[in-house]
Image (tube, helix red, strand yellow):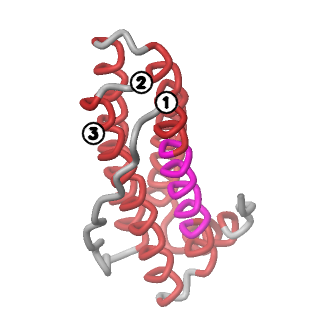
Amino acid sequence: MITSKLQKIINDQITAELWSSNLYLQMSYFLKHQGWDGFAHWMKVHSDEEREHATRMADYLTDRGGQVKLQMVNLVPEGWGSVPEVFEHSLNQEKMVSKMIDKIVLHAIEEQDFATENFFRTFVDEQVEEEALFSGIVDKMKNSGDTGLLFLDSVLAKRPSE
């Protein structure tokens, strides 16, 4: 059985993943409204991925005898100034999520809950990839100018749906 302390922080993480999913979905609609269909598609796929993370975590919690407590997901921002700002905001969100997952792993180690530590280490690895992914997109935007944004929009439109 998983401890109540770990249950709480995992439930908090589930909420954070759902909030991230809503954030990226809102960003998708914002970008689509701005005429950036490729960026919008990319963000929508990423939104689905975050929701899938929440589901995996909830399934893990119930598999360990814990109780999932879905919490209220706060409102997300509705607009940003530019496409690069959308992706910079997303990068900051991923960094915050990384810190939250690190906290879960730390608590699991302290409690000698090796199953939880092992399960969440997959998310530690995934967060490294996600931060690098967003960071790479932000760097490309900074270095490419307006013409590069058009090209990058068409490239990101090709992201397969999961």
Contact flag, marks 2 and 3 (Cβ < 8 Å): no
Q: Amino acid at mark 2?
A: Met
Mark closer to the chain start, 2 or 1: 2
Residue 67 lies within the magenta run: no
- The dominant secondary structure in magenta is helix
Mark closer to the chain start, 2 or 3: 2
Residue that numbered label 3 is attached to: 8
Location of residue 9 by image quarter: top left
Residue 54 lies within the magenta run: yes
Across and down, in percent, residue 62 comes to 49, 40
Along the viewing direction, whichever of 55 and 63 lies nearer the viewer = 63
* Measured Cα–Cα span from mark 2 to mark 1: 6 Å
| Range of magenta residues | 43-58
Judge depth for marks 3 and 1 and give the one in front: 1
Along the viewing direction, whichever of 55 and 130 lies nearer the viewer = 55
Residue that numbered label 1 is attached to: 64
Along the viewing direction, whichever of 79 and 12 lies nearer the viewer = 12
Across and down, in percent, residue 135 comes to 45, 46
Give the residue drawn at x 57%, y 70%.
Answer: 44
Contact flag, marks 2 and 1 (Cβ < 8 Å): yes
Across and down, in percent, residue 123 comes to 50, 34
Across and down, in percent, residue 5 comes to 24, 30
* Measured Cα–Cα span from mark 3 to mark 1: 14 Å
* Measured Cα–Cα span from mark 2 to mark 3: 13 Å
SS under mark 1? loop
Residue that numbered label 2 is attached to: 1
The answer to whether 1 is drawn above or below residue 68 in the figure is: above
Contact flag, marks 3 and 1 (Cβ < 8 Å): no
Q: Amino acid at mark 3?
A: Lys
Left or right: residue 27 compared with residue 140: left
